[in-house]
Amino acid sequence: MVSLASDPSLRDPAWTRRVAWVSLALVLLIPALIATEFKPWIFFNADNLKVTSRFIGDFFPPEIGAEFLRMVMVEAWRTIAIASAGMALALVVAIPMTLAATSVLSVSSLSGRMHALPFGIRQALRWILILLRSIPELVWALVFVRVVGLGPAAGVLAIGLTYAGMLGKVYSEILESGDTHATTTLLRNGGGRLQAFFFGLLPQNATELTSYTVYRWECAIRSSAVLGFVGAGGLGQQMDASMKMFNGGEVATILLVFMALVGLADLLSAWLRRVIQ
Amino acid sequence: MRPDARPNPWLRWDCSVCWVTVGLAVLVVASFWSLDLQLGRLFSMDSAKRMGRFFGELLSPNIDPKFLTKLAVASVETLAMSALGTLLAAVFGLMLAVPASKSHRDDPARWRWITRLVLNALRSIPELVWAALILISAGLGPFAGTLALALHTTGVLGRLFSESIENAPQGAAYALRIQGIAEGRIFLFATLPTVLPQLLSYTLYRWENNIRAAAVLGVVGGGGLGQMLAFHMGLFQMQETSSILIAMIILVVLVDSLSYLSRRLMSR
């Protein structure tokens, strides 16, 4: 051992760095473990073990009664419907806001700087989009369940608002990141803003915009399934009910249907994006 | 026939874009029709009044120092949940990514399909559903939330990690393999150092996502800001609800702008 430490060619050159990183990690990790009440041993507490094993034992076999399956299918469709209706609402909100917020369609910025008023309006719209986006859809859903009552309307509104923020922000980024030469030429030669959009900006970015929208639709299906947990309808609500009754068989069926739904949306969206290219 | 007299591309039967558009339109109409949203009631004076009152109540947040301390503790709890969940996920994701990847041409990769199946299953169940499932055995609190984040993120990171291991440049690993060095050492000394920067950036990106997810996980009982939100909203304590919502927005905007700034600094 002594010879190993004294021989410089055998010493680990990164030794001090390694020690420093490990001790820093420990210093950060320990408070995190305390803050999250990280106690894995509670899983092996006798009472917990009994409850858990009974619940998981109930998973097999999954509940496949005709009545229950029919209900799960209806809820699965409602999940898709909430996502699609929410996306439609999001598009209705996002498209006009994108048109108003993109700086590419600014006439005053063609000659020098953008004027103060349009600049202010664009910045304000951008902040609204950021605000819409930064409140998670689950929180919107909680709020809307309070205001419009339990049911799919809350889910549609929640998805609509959050996704309007996301779509609006990404749409304007896509429109501004591409080549804007054709659009500015149209504007310079006296074309209206909408004309410049439809004949310059849109054809150039149509595939990217569509494929992002399809991808977001897929995400919307995933989140609409989750929104049910706060009472916004769909598969989540059903799963919440079954879980509260500790009915493992029903939970297993719903989980399987849910995974199939997500997988299907995944495949469909990948296929659609390929078709559009 | 004049050269510009081609048939209108929008009217051809194999116009894929048109079919997709029609399909989506049908889907949207069917959705609105089957959901029975009672839009009339939604946009009535009554619900507008209720919405106005609700948002009016949100305008006066609770700024009692005692409550703000509680809020800060919950925010730290949310951050700790996301950090620990991501860390666990990175460790387990890497452990699963190795058997899930075919690292070179002659790699038999016997466990590839089964580990991929596990990763897909972990990934396709959202954090919130995991949290609701784990609650049954771990009880309410941040521990359940942390584990839920870790499980879902393990699926996501494991898949991303295995893809970057498979796409890594083979030079260094090949050089070691030809010397007859064991696979484990090849991974540690050739493949892992090559892909490590990419793995780190994936992990950081997921951490950013997980902070947002951790803020809402509590709504089903997984600790942090979400649990406070569900609690105070359930009791109709609108001042507290308002403060919690503001804290959530600040947290999310902070994380977003930090990640934006760091991306800009790194790409410069």
Image (tube, grey):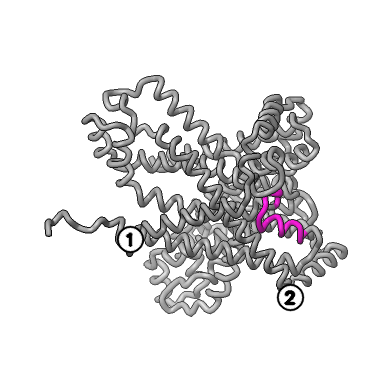
Q: Quadrant of residue A186 in the image?
A: top left
Name which residue lies at 70% across and 24% down.
Answer: B60
Q: Quadrant of the C terminus of chain A?
A: bottom left
Q: Residue at x 37, y 67 (%)?
A: B171
Asked which quadrant contains residue A76, the reply is bottom right
In the rendered image, residue A107, in percent from the top left (x then y), is placed at 31, 27
Left or right of B185 in this view: A183: left
Q: Position of residue B106 (x, y in %)?
A: 43, 79
Name the residue: 76% across, 34% down: B70
State how far apart marks 2 and 1 are (Cα): 46 Å
Chain of the residue where label 2 is placed in the rendered structure = A
Q: Identity of the amino acid at label 1?
A: Cys
Q: In terms of image quadrants, where is residue A78?
A: bottom right
Q: Is residue A242 magenta?
A: yes
Q: Tag 2's secondary structure?
A: loop
Question: Tag on residue B15?
Answer: 1
Magenta region: A229-243
Residue B165 in sight from this viewpoint: yes
Give the residue at the far right of this rendering: A47
Question: In the displayed structure, would residue A128 be above or below residue B11?
Answer: above
- Determine the residue positioned at 33% across, 44% down: A202
Amino acid type of the residue tagged 2 in the rendering: Pro
Residue A61's disc is 2
In which chain is the residue bearing label 1? B
Query: Horizontally, is A65 left or right of A186 in the view?
Result: right
